[in-house]
Image (cartoon, coloured by chain):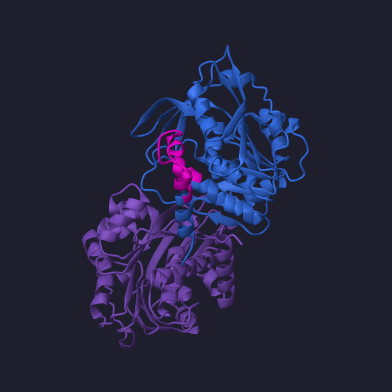
Chain colours: A blue, B purple
Amino acid sequence: MNNKLLAIGTMAFDEIITPTMESGKVLGGAATYIGLAASYADAEIGVVSVIGADFPEKYLNLLTSRGIDVSGVERVTDGKSFYWKGKYYDNMNKRDTLDTQLNVLAAFNPTVPKRFLDASVVMLGNLDPNVQHKVLDQLTPNKDRIVLLDTMNFWMDSQLAPLKNVIKQVDVITINDEEAIQLSGESNLVTAAKTIHNMGPKYVIIKKGEHGALLFYKDHPFYAPALPLEQVIDPTGAGDSFAGGLSGYLATQQEVSAEVLKEGILRGTAAASLCVGAMGTKGLEVSDKEAFLQQLKKLNRLRTIA
Amino acid sequence: MNNKLLAIGTMAFDEIITPTMESGKVLGGAATYIGLAASYADAEIGVVSVIGADFPEKYLNLLTSRGIDVSGVERVTDGKSFYWKGKYYDNMNKRDTLDTQLNVLAAFNPTVPKRFLDASVVMLGNLDPNVQHKVLDQLTPNKDRIVLLDTMNFWMDSQLAPLKNVIKQVDVITINDEEAIQLSGESNLVTAAKTIHNMGPKYVIIKKGEHGALLFYKDHPFYAPALPLEQVIDPTGAGDSFAGGLSGYLATQQEVSAEVLKEGILRGTAAASLCVGAMGTKGLEVSDKEAFLQQLKKLNRLRTIA
């Protein structure tokens, strides 16, 4: 493993409405959250994404200040950035998408920077599976490589065949519980994980939000609880932060075993808990590595008896 | 601690309808499940309950065969046993009560057998809080005593003042997530646990069904996951089995600390996982101590990295 993490995903403007707050137009996007969350690990991180003329330089600088290589972020000077507007209800477990404007994302043709073509860890963030596929096609061989995929129901509904084609090629899939049920056609998480496992991924991680995450690997599942929180301000980006915390940690390891993956899931959970504590990316922005390790410590205390 | 567990609760006829099965009239009741689940621990167990003329001797013999003292089970020879009929839907997370006939339970005046008046552990199973209170009033002092309470929304709706009066006197409360929200008037489990803690119990255990259980104690919550199961046959009695596995374990200990309680929660979870694997009490009936320890082992594997 060469310590390099290549992350692909959207960079976007989000507008988030919760029962008590409205964010206005703020920084968002899977690649943004993944990058910020992964930066708690001492890995070399490169992000591949696309932005429009309207995307503020300060947002890129935020990533750069966290040591993230943004040379793979293409700016389309005559285009507008991807935009998403969503609204959460009462207990934050349900949300409606109010508006989606693909803009520059519609014709996105990703180019992986040379330096990251041999990355040991590749995190395919939530995005059109055809774009995820184009990234895989560019990579140079690396026998230690671990490819992770995050996806959502939107792509199951609209691009199932290309999605299944990508799923076939990845080692790890992260997917939420409802989506695991949908993708597998099963009605139970254990059988759903088996079915998805048979689609390709060696490791199936099912995210259950406030109820934590389950890793299915061979016959020995692993359960990582989520930190019980007094207040969830905004769940946007929690899944991406989980993917970032996980993949960043994997990139720092000599090799990836089930044990390493489990530890990575705890890192992902810790990053997600920072994320949901504030609006948009703010939770990750204001939390340094010390704060991250503090969450990890709380999480381990939550799991253990003594 | 004197190794004695006193358990109080209903003994009943249940009729259970699930999406794929109908039980017919079978053995049920909180005290039944608590007793069977507690019997995996090497404690001396006494059950206080009430039955009618119609209650088969073989059901009592089942408990006796597990070493449970049923001398505190009063038989009302001119009465009928408590009867409950319920129906579960699709994912087993929702159920409707179709029929409840209190019968002999309506005038139940519990008498604790002499031998269990000084029990170190008292498990007040789900029952009218006025009856729970009458049990507490009979006990002789025991400075090491731990009293646990299980209850449900029915008593919050109909007997809130007596329920709060019992809650004030117990050390441990086990309650499910929705009921914790209802009892506390809070909208979040962390704040709900704090509010319930202020009502009396030192330890607040919130049961989340397939999502495990959370112990709130001081500022350090503990999370016990539930075993991911391929098939849940019948959730009836899962909460009672949890209470039984937990309280039985506590009775075997020299003293009860937070660590002991955490271990007890794992035992409760293991018992509950046996319970839901078959219709009614069958899951507990067919599982011996070896099977129970096997579930506990799986549960510990689920929680740990190495």
- Percent of width and height locating residue A27: 47, 27
Specify whether B34 is left or right of B146.
right
Residue B198, relative to residue A284: is it above or below?
A: below
Specify whether B289 is left or right of B81.
right
Q: Residue at x 36, y 72 (%)?
A: B9
Residue B306, relative to residue B79: is it above or below?
A: above
Residue A155, relative to residue B142: is it above or below?
A: above
Q: Residue at x 58, y 53 (%)?
A: A263
Specify whether A169 is left or right of A37.
right
Specify whether A156 is left or right of B247.
right
Q: Nearer the viewer, residue A139 or B245?
A: A139
Q: Nearer the viewer, residue B154 or A205?
A: A205
Q: Is residue A290 magenta?
A: yes
In the orientation shown, which residue stands out farthest toward the top?
A78
Q: Number of numbered discs present? A: 0
State which region is magenta. Answer: A271-293
Most prominent secondary structure in the magenta stretch?
helix
- Percent of width and height locating residue B246: 43, 71
Q: Nearer the viewer, residue B157 or A99?
A: A99
Judge whether residue B169 can be spotted in this image: yes
- Percent of width and height locating residue A92: 41, 39
Judge whether residue A84 can be spotted in this image: no
Q: Is residue A198 magenta?
A: no
Write down the quadrant of residue A149 in the picture.
top right
- Percent of width and height locating residue A180: 60, 44
**Image quarter in which the C terminus of chain B is found:** bottom right
